[in-house]
């Protein structure tokens, strides 16, 4: 239980330099993967006989207190048949755009999980078909709440938060996408249609 | 699946030899062309929630309808977002436990156990025997009350009122037990790192014994009411079905995963709290529809009852045994010693002021919660507050499959499918 997962040497011989350091913490194996190859590595882990990590337990991210440390996107993989776990991490430099390839098409379970990481940490998953905020609302402008540079009470003052909440039009909670997909669009009040025609994104204010 | 159903049903029409009720073909289905023609091809947008009794909390569904057929379902979550994960980064490990009460508030005790297990795994703490047994009792009691709420509310969603009263009556008995144990009915905060907040009070076992001996009768009644009920079968069989491959691909867990025929239960496959030493069965479905999810939850309550009985037997052998580990780093010394002994006072002070300090490292600890696999991913940098506390929320991940399950079904089925996922918005939104 406390030893290194045999998947790590297998990964090294398959992907070579794309596999970074590894560690064992509390008996669980962590392996770092180069961001540009992460999709290939995860697909290989899912499909290769002997690995068969067919179950994506979780996708999340970690921002460390040390501002110099890289932000990590964490994939918890599991093989239901072999009863084995592996934690794959992709480290991203916060000074550059946080981008990693989506695993939506490998595991549909990644859909909301990646949206949540995008929402909370601002990591963009390229290739995700519907990457938008999930827990916070679409027009949320304070930033990414689970980043360490985000204060516990948010960036805006309580007064500003209240003002924005009161200014929101409670009848206009449909996103542009939802309104345009249905014929209900034709029955909307004139002013709402005008605002849609002006190209207002997301939820109407 | 259950033996007693087979016995009761052998001579009953509508049940096949295997005891499984005969599948009643649905009169209408998503691709039934006549309905579309009748109602025209006009598409309509229907909004359900966030304030709607059938969404089981503040879930909002925007549904695109063609006639009565769901073309697309767009869920909106986040109305109950409380930022627990962020808040946890500002709290000591033991101070996080009250936050876990409020995530999946239908099974608070099981969440408490999961959190304590995660921190203990990080620190390498070996629990006492009595603590493990009491935690198993807490987990299984939670499973029963959570499934009872699911049963009652789903019954109401589909028009059956009586089982709601039965299940809430039974649930009340467990809430009384929880109150006697922890002083709270809902916000139990039962565990502490290295043990428990309190041992059970005197005579508490008798109350639980009484529950475990009479509870199967209620399950029997529910079984009679639902399992071969034509309306129930018509509303649930073949509705919202997912195959095993889909269920795995969607990262489903708990009854949702097992209903699709995947035999995976965290208690069996990566046991914690000595679950491998308990004698219980894991119910696995076949069709992956709402009906199978119902059968699995019903069977899980029977199995939980079995586990509770076994745990009570073990508890009687462990009378007077300690519930906390004897590690001054994590457990407060007795107050009398803290007042008279210098060393004990220092440990007391350090723990109250600084909290427990796991070594730098990280751990993912998953437990089988009523809703599915609840995982806590903890990253520690050696201080008394976690760098990251991630909840792997089973409701959230299970709910993500809702659009796929709803597509092509009827609008009224959306309510049934949503109910079958068994979500708690406190956990979905965290």
Image: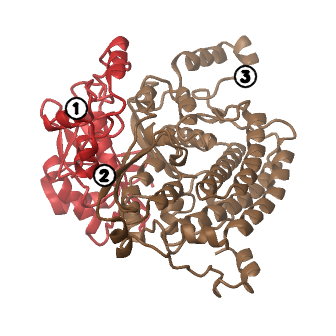
Chain colours: A red, B brown
Is tag 2's residue or tag 1's residue first in the polypeptide sequence?
2
Q: CA distance from mark 3 to mark 1?
A: 69 Å
Q: Quadrant of residue B386 in the image?
A: top left
Q: Position of residue B90 (x, y in %)?
A: 43, 22
Q: Report in which chain the residue with disc 3 lies.
A: B
Residue shown at 73% from the left, 58% from the top: B305
Q: Position of residue B268 (x, y in %)?
A: 56, 62
Q: CA distance from mark 3 to mark 2?
A: 49 Å
Residue shown at 68% from the left, 67% from the top: B226
Q: Which mark is residue A111?
A: 2
Label 1: element kind: helix
Q: Quadrant of the C terminus of chain B?
A: top left
According to the picture, the residue beneath numbered tag 3 turns out to be B334
Label 3: element kind: loop
Q: Report in which chain the residue with disc 1 lies.
A: A
**Residue B355 vertical placement versus A31 (above, below):** above
Q: Quadrant of residue B225 in the image?
A: bottom right
Q: Report in which chain the residue with disc 2 lies.
A: A
In-image side of A197 versus B16 (left or right): left
2 and 1 marks in contact (CB < 8 Å): no
Q: Nearer the viewer, residue B273 or A27?
A: B273
Q: CA distance from mark 2 to mark 1?
A: 34 Å
Mark 3 burial class by Cα count in 10 Å: few <14, some 14-19, many 20+? few
Q: Quadrant of the N terminus of chain B?
A: bottom right
Residue shown at 25% from the left, 42% from the top: A132
According to the picture, the residue beneath numbered tag 1 turns out to be A191
**Residue B12 vertical placement versus B320 (above, below):** below
**Residue B352 vertical placement versus A91 (above, below):** above
Label 2: element kind: helix
């Amino acid at each position: 239980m406390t030893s290194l997962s045999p998947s790590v040497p297998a990964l090294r011989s398959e992907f070579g330099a794309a596999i970074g350091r590894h560690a064992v913490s509390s008996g669980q194996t962590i392996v770092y993967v180069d961001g540009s190859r992460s999709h290939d590595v995860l697909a290989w882990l899912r499909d290769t006989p002997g690995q068969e990590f067919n179950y994506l337990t979780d996708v999340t991210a970690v921002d460390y207190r040390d501002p110099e440390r890289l932000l990590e996107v964490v994939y918890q993989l599991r093989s239901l048949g072999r009863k084995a776990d592996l934690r794959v991490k992709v480290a991203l430099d916060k000074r550059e755009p946080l981008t990693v390839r989506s695993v939506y098409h490998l595991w549909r379970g990644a859909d909301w999980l990646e949206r949540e990481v995008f929402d909370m940490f601002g990591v963009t998953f390229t290739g995700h078909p519907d990457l938008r905020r999930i827990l916070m609302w679409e027009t949320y402008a304070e930033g990414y709440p689970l980043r360490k540079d985000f204060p516990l009470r948010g960036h805006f003052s309580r007064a500003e938060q209240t003002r924005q909440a009161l200014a929101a039009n409670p009848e206009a909670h449909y996103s542009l996408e939802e309104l345009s997909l249905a014929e209900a669009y034709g029955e909307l009040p004139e002013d709402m249609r005008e605002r849609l025609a002006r190209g207002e994104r997301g939820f109407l204010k | 699946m259950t033996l007693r159903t087979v016995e009761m049903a052998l001579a009953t029409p509508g049940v096949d030899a295997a005891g499984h009720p005969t599948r009643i073909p649905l009169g209408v289905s998503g691709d039934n062309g006549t309905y579309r023609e009748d109602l025209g091809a006009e598409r309509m947008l229907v909004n359900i929630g966030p304030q709607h009794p059938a969404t089981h909390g503040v879930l909002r569904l925007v549904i695109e309808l063609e006639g009565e057929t769901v073309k697309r379902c767009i869920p909106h979550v986040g109305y109950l977002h409380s930022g627990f994960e962020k808040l946890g980064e500002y709290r000591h490990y033991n101070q996080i436990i009250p936050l876990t009460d409020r995530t999946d508030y239908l099974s608070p005790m099981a969440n408490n156990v999961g959190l304590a297990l995660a921190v203990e795994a990080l620190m390498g703490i070996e629990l006492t025997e009595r603590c493990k047994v009491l935690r198993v009792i807490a987990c299984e009691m939670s499973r029963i009350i959570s499934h009872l709420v699911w049963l009652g509310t789903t019954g109401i969603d589909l028009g059956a009122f009586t089982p709601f009263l039965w299940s809430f009556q039974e649930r009340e008995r467990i809430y009384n037990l929880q109150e006697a144990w922890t002083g709270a009915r809902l916000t139990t905060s039962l565990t502490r790192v290295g043990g428990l907040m309190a041992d059970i009070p005197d005579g508490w076992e008798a109350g639980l014994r009484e529950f475990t001996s009479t509870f199967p009768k209620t399950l029997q009644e529910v079984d009679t009411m639902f399992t071969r009920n034509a309306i129930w079968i018509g509303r649930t069989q073949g509705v919202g079905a997912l195959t095993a491959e889909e269920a795995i691909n969607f990262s489903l867990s708990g009854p949702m995963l097992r209903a699709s025929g995947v035999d995976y239960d965290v208690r069996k496959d990566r046991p914690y709290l000595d679950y491998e030493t308990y004698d219980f069965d894991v119910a696995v479905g076949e069709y992956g529809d709402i009906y199978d999810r119902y059968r699995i939850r019903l069977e899980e309550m029977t199995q939980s009852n079995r586990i509770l009985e076994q745990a009570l037997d073990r508890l009687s052998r462990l009378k007077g045994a300690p519930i906390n580990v004897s590690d001054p780093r994590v457990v407060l010394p007795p107050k009398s010693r803290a007042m008279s002994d210098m060393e004990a006072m220092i440990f007391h002070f350090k723990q109250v002021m600084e909290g427990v300090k796991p070594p730098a490292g990280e751990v993912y600890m998953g437990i089988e919660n009523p809703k599915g696999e609840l995982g806590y991913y903890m990253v520690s940098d050696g201080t008394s507050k976690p760098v990251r506390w991630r909840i792997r929320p089973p409701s959230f991940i299970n709910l993500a499959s809702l659009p796929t399950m709803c597509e092509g079904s009827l609008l009224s089925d959306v309510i049934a499918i949503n109910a079958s996922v068994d979500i708690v918005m406190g956990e979905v939104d965290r």
